[in-house]
Image: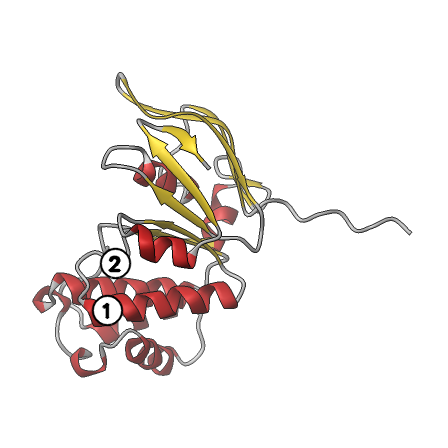
Amino acid sequence: MDASPAPPPALAFHDVSKRYGRHWAVARLSYSLPQGRSLLLTGHNGSGKTTLLRLVATALSPTHGRVEVRGRDCVQEREQVRREVALLSHASFLYEDLTAHQNLVVLARLLGVASPADVAEGLLGKVGLTRRTERPVRQFSAGMRKRLAIARLLLKKPAVALLDEPFGELDPAGIAAMEAIIGELKTSGVTVVLATHLIEQGLSLCEERLHLSDGRAVAA
């Protein structure tokens, strides 16, 4: 009996380049991440990490080459990819005049989640915001916004979680909570792609590392 075919990679970059005007943010990048592995992206500011994450999230399209998520083309199958991917970015995209609880309930209803209020309450407890559930987000500190943004990502239950500097603006307790959440995501089978300047934390959480310089992979 023939063996079952191997699953497609969690992520695959096929000779990918992305240009802004005359500047190449990503240049001729080829890389494949197997399912069941998580990836640490490192590199100085402007090295291409955020652009790479946005290409996977379908917020950008490559100038050349092809990006795939679990075998799906991020341009040709954009909507299907978006259902499987969630991006934690520098911009939180939160509703400023709603409370933390209301922000999660709105998204839960859009996603068709059963018992949205109860699910929202549970997620706020997981990210340490139970005492601030009725305050409008415009009153939140940067660290509180980051906690709420990760709760939104967890609500989506992605197959691939893209985390762009997830430890930024967090205090030590928040960093520890974020490490625990990333560990739980991995245990549940989620592919994590982590871009961070905190190399020690990143290396402890990811099995693979891709170092970028001026949009090119210099170590993997």
Measuring from the top left, give residue 105's x and y in whole percent. 31, 73
Name the amino acid, label 2. Phe
Calculate the distance from the C-alpha at mark 2 to the C-alpha at mark 1: 8 Å
Label 2 or label 1, whichever comes before in sequence order:
2
For the point 58% across and 51% down, the residue is: 35
Measuring from the top left, give residue 130's x and y in whole percent. 23, 82
Question: Where on the picture, by quarter, is residue 184?
Answer: bottom left
How packed is label 1: few (under 14 Cα within 10 Å), some, or many (20 or more)?
many
Question: Where on the picture, by quarter, is residue 127?
Answer: bottom left
Name the amino acid, label 1. Gly
Question: What residue is pinned by disc 1?
Answer: 174
User: Is the residue under label 1 in contact with that under label 2 (CB below 8 Å)?
Assistant: yes
Q: What element carries label 1?
A: helix
Question: Who is closer to the viewer here, 75 or 14?
Answer: 14
* Residue at the left extreme, as displayed: 139
Residue 167 image label = 2
Measuring from the top left, give residue 123's x and y in whole percent. 34, 76
**Where 158 sits versus 177, above or below?**
above
